[in-house]
Image (cartoon, helix red, strand yellow):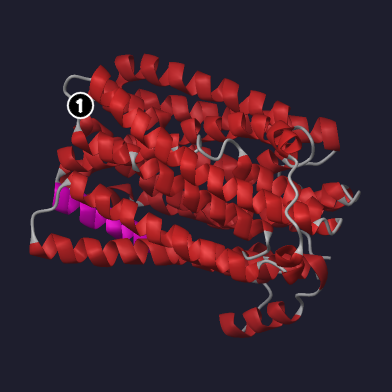
Amino acid sequence: ESGVDVCVGLRDGSSSVADWARRQLGRMTGAEGAMSAAAFGTLFTSLGGTAIRFVLQIALSNWLGQAAYGLFVLGRGWGELLSKVPSRGYMMTALRVLPDYEHNEEWGLCRGFVRSASRETAVGGIVLAVLAALGYGLLVPSAESAIVFGLFLAPALAVVGMYRALLQAAHQYVPATGLTELFQPVLFGVVLGGLAVATDMTAEAALVLYIGSMALTAVLEALLLRRSLPDAIHASEQRFRRKDWVATARPLFVAQLALAALQVVDLLVVGAILGAAEAALYGVATRVAVLGRVVNSGLESVVSPRISKAYASGTPGDIQGIVDQTIRISAAPTLGFALLVALAADPVLSLFGAEYVDARSVLLILLVGNVTNALTGPSGFVISMTGSEWTYAAVMGAHAVGLTVLSFWLGWTHGIVGVAIGRSLINVSWNMTLVVLARRRLDVRCYPRRTTFSRT
């Protein structure tokens, strides 16, 4: 049996979930078994972190009120967008080159890349935040302090993301996910709860606590990475191939920035043209909808370096198996979540406050994009991790521009519902484009087929 089949395995008549899980774990052998074990670990860690973050967002929305919560999500949105700039594409480059260096035992290059990527990301993030804050203060007369704090979130997010990518490339999937998905939100929640009890909560205070929790997470990631790297790396003299790294990172940087824009630009447009209150409604709908992607996101952290390694080792046929397993595991939970939320949209949204029920239509529209992501598997990594970085960058960049244009146009004419329609259309478009490219260039089918769910 090929690894752990979550979607099919539950049909085997097990007397209990525990018995079924033990049988599946016993079948975990070989590369696919290792992938399954890592996928299970990251998946359950991501699920736990997602639940914690969901509760935190409910608490924040009720403590802050709609307008202040809107400022919080806008500040966080700007920080998330800018956080992709300091690494200059090195996050995805780590997943692209480090498995290749490991395969060829080029330990000096591993050490040099880790040192350069981490230091340059940290320094670049701080410089970017300072310049962005100064520019925002000079260009916007009525500058919101919450947006300024959000800009300083960028370096913390950038360093956390960089170290997470390095840990994933070092096969530390579960610890990397645990620090960002469990430790950080728990720390943020504990301090946030204490402050909320002691004093009135503001968007600025919440953002400062968020930045602090991210900074401490980055420190722990750095310590874990140092302990996780093989002794051969520590014993090797650093070697640098900045020209090669930059050549690989350049298209991935464009793609990374475009992907960040695709995740938050619609929210930022809502805040710019419709105000913080509408941004709060849209932000809540986005946060609920994105819960449906937790399985797919958890798997992506495992499969991306494996796709790169399969391509680098000259076994591209293995990529189809990785894609099939990802779709097999993620399709049913995503479809089930979308159906459940569609049926219970009002009760779910009312947890954030009675006024958030107005975001029902937005939530239902955004769920379409999540289903598309699950059914197309890791199509983006199939393109970006197999030597087609510029193609991936072009696809994501074009769709990011398209989302920006559609968000302004449909936002002015149809409000937040129009923005949600634009986002879902763009989401479906970019996934379908990547599916076609994967089929034509690599003969990899990034969509469900009969054999995807068959048991071998």
User: Horizontal placement of 128 versus 147: left or right?
Assistant: right
Q: Residue furthest left?
A: 199
Snapshot quadrant of residue 285 = top left
Q: Nearer the viewer, residue 43 or 74?
A: 74
Q: Nearer the viewer, residue 373 or 63?
A: 63
Q: Quadrant of the N terminus?
A: bottom right
- Give percent across and percent down for residue 399: 56, 24
User: Horizontal placement of 203 versus 379: left or right?
Assistant: left
Do we see residue 250 in this rendering? yes
Residue type at mark 1: give it.
Ala
Snapshot quadrant of residue 188 = bottom left
Please tell me whether residue 358 belongs to the stretch shown in magenta: no
Q: Quadrant of the C terminus?
A: bottom right
Span shown in magenta? 51-64
Snapshot quadrant of residue 420 = top left
Name the residue beneath numbered marker 1: 143
Q: Residue at x 68, y 56 (%)?
A: 169
Q: Nearer the viewer, residue 409 or 168?
A: 168
- Give percent across and percent down for residue 114: 64, 53
Secondary structure of the residue carrying numbered label 1: loop
Q: Residue at x 68, y 28 (%)?
A: 433
Q: In this picture, is 140 found above or below 259?
A: above
User: Horizontal placement of 336 versus 275: left or right?
Assistant: right
Do we see residue 16 in this rendering? no
Please tell me whether residue 53 belongs to the stretch shown in magenta: yes
